[in-house]
Image: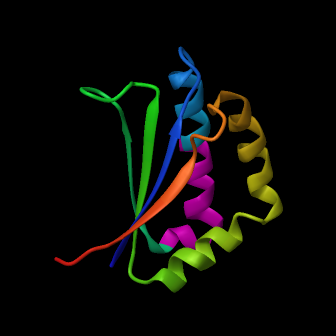
Amino acid sequence: MYNCVWTIDIVFGKQKEALEIIKAWGAEKFRSSHFKNSVNRLSVGHIGKSASHIVDEYLFESLADFEKALADMGLPQFKQYSDAIAPYIVPASQKWTVYRMID
């Protein structure tokens, strides 16, 4: 099992707008991509981390499943979401981190 974590920092004061986009994007991911084979959890910073820090986690059975889901993000229905969120992301803050779960 792999915990694939996408983290971004959002421009101050734009958390609500960014979360609306991420939630809509997530709904489309689960409708029409390999992300439907994962379990998702969305979090924001609270204590010790800025509320502008967003954590979007996906649990996949295999790295192959994760890679297929990422490849699906090139499908035309997803471009609107990446375009919509781009102005809210602090430059160079977005990244994927993958953890291999041991239990």
State yes or no: residue 30 in magenta.
Answer: yes
Give residue 79's position: percent from left, percent from top: 79, 51
Q: Residue furthest right?
A: 76
At 54% from the left edge and 68% from the top edge, which residue is drawn?
35
Q: Is residue 40 above or below residue 12?
A: below
Q: Is residue 72 above or below residue 20?
A: below
Q: Nearer the viewer, residue 41 or 4?
A: 4
State yes or no: residue 48 in magenta.
Answer: no
Left or right of 69, for residue 80: right
At 53% from the left edge and 14% from the top edge, which residue is drawn?
13
Q: Residue furthest left?
A: 103
Q: Quadrant of residue 87?
A: top right
At 65% from the left edge and 28% from the top edge, which residue is drawn?
88
Q: Quadrant of residue 71?
A: bottom right
Q: Is residue 15 above or below residue 94?
A: above
Give residue 81's position: percent from left, percent from top: 71, 44
Q: Nearer the viewer, residue 34 or 88?
A: 88
Give residue 2's position: percent from left, percent from top: 37, 74
**Part of the protein shown in magenta:** 23-36
Give residue 45's position: percent from left, percent from top: 35, 31
Left or right of 33, for residue 2: left
Q: Quadrant of residue 84?
A: top right
Specify the principal SS of the magenta part: helix
* Quadrant occupied by the C terminus: bottom left
* Quadrant occupied by the N terminus: bottom left
- Total residue callouts: 0
At 51% from the left edge and 24% from the top edge, which residue is drawn?
15
Q: Is residue 86 above or below residue 6?
A: above
Q: Residue furthest top?
A: 13
Q: How is the image coloured?
A: rainbow
